[in-house]
Image (tube, grey):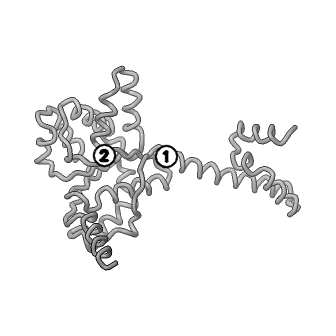
């Protein structure tokens, strides 16, 4: 049996660590004269770790969180009114266990999306699945599915994960069809999966982004039934960072 065929069989058995590290692993085992029982236990441990790492990497890819700053970079002093203790409690992810929702509301650039992405990352690190999208991308994605089977397949992308983040509700207006699609996702996830929704508008103003949508009241009702609202205030972090860059450029 050649080395290549052995590695191929490891892959077929989904022993990914051995398939990629076979020669090195055998050499270390021979050099250390490891006992057969210890060798099997070592292989098992390494394969379990490799499987967990691959699972985490896959869930991160599928979540499409994108690049983001960690909470270590969050400027708590800049965002007035925000309760750090309340935000820290969210990272226990208790809201996922109860299938509750989070509404992060406030003006543009105050850290809503940053916190939502960090919560998604935290959920994935604890073994959960997540999906990050904007409201406009969600509506566009579902609206392009012409066949019922394709629609259901795409819909499951937003319904299936433990956590769905719907970003930027309020920046663009939606027609009634888009509103119905968003409602369909929220309705299917009702009491079965958590949603984090970021918005720059209070619920009373949602009629301006969903004009004439018959489902609006029902949509808000399902979102808020089991929901914690986090209010953000303050000026944009991006405006602050741009001002700091300009100040530093003037000094140089």
The x, y position of residue 7, in whole percent, is 77, 42
Near mark 1 (Cα within 10 A), the count class, few <14, some 14-19 or many ≥20, is: few
Where 239 falls versus 9 (above or below)? below
Q: Residue furthest bottom?
A: 251
- Helix, strand or loop status at disc 1: helix
Where 117 falls versus 210 (above or below)? below
Q: From the viewer's side, name the closer residue of 26 and 196.
A: 26
Image point (31%, 69%), residue name:
85
Image point (28%, 75%), residue name:
247
Q: Residue furthest top?
A: 147
Relative to residue 209, is residue 62 drawn left or right?
Answer: right
Please tell me in which quadrant of the rendered image residue 231 appears.
bottom left
Where 180 falls versus 162 (above or below)? above
Relative to residue 236, is residue 52 drawn left or right?
Answer: right
Image point (36%, 26%), residue name:
151
Q: CA distance from mark 1 to mark 2?
A: 17 Å
Image point (32%, 42%), residue name:
191
The x, y position of residue 112, in whole percent, is 28, 58
The residue that disc 2 covers is 166
Relative to residue 34, is residue 165 drawn left or right?
Answer: left
Q: Which mark is residue 61?
A: 1
Q: Earlier in the sequence, mark 1 or mark 2?
A: 1
- Helix, strand or loop status at disc 2: strand
Question: Mark 2 and mark 1 in contact (Cβ < 8 Å)?
Answer: no
The x, y position of residue 86, in whole percent, is 30, 65
Q: From the viewer's side, name the closer residue of 205 and 251.
A: 251
Q: Which mark is residue 200?
A: none
Near mark 2 (Cα within 10 A), the count class, few <14, some 14-19 or many ≥20, is: many
Please tell me in which quadrant of the rendered image residue 251 appears.
bottom left
Task: Give the quarter of the figure containing the C terminus.
Answer: bottom left
Observer-side mark, 1 or 2, equals 1
């Amino acid at each position: 049996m050649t080395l290549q065929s052995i590695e191929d069989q490891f892959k077929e058995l989904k022993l990914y660590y051995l398939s990629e590290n076979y020669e090195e692993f055998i050499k270390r085992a021979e050099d250390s004269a490891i006992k057969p029982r210890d060798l099997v236990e070592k292989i098992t441990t390494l394969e379990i770790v490799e499987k967990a790492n691959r699972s985490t990497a896959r869930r991160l890819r599928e979540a499409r969180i994108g690049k983001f700053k960690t909470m270590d970079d969050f400027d708590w002093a800049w965002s007035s009114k925000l309760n750090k203790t309340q935000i820290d409690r969210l990272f226990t992810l208790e809201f996922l266990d109860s299938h509750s929702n989070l509404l992060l509301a406030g003006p543009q650039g105050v850290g809503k999306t940053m916190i939502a992405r960090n919560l998604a990352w935290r959920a994935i690190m604890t073994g959960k699945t997540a999906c990050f999208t904007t409201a406009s991308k969600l509506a566009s994605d579902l609206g392009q599915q012409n066949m019922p089977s394709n629609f259901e397949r795409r819909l499951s992308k937003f319904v299936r994960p433990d956590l769905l983040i719907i970003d930027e509700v309020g920046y663009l207006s939606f027609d009634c069809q888009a509103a119905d699609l968003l409602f369909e996702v929220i309705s299917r996830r009702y009491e079965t999966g958590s949603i984090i929704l970021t918005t720059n508008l209070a619920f009373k103003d949602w009629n301006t982004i969903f004009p004439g949508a018959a489902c609006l009241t029902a949509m808000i009702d399902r979102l808020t039934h089991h929901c914690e609202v986090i209010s953000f205030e303050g000026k944009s972090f991006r405006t602050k960072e741009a001002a700091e860059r300009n100040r530093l450029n003037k000094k140089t």
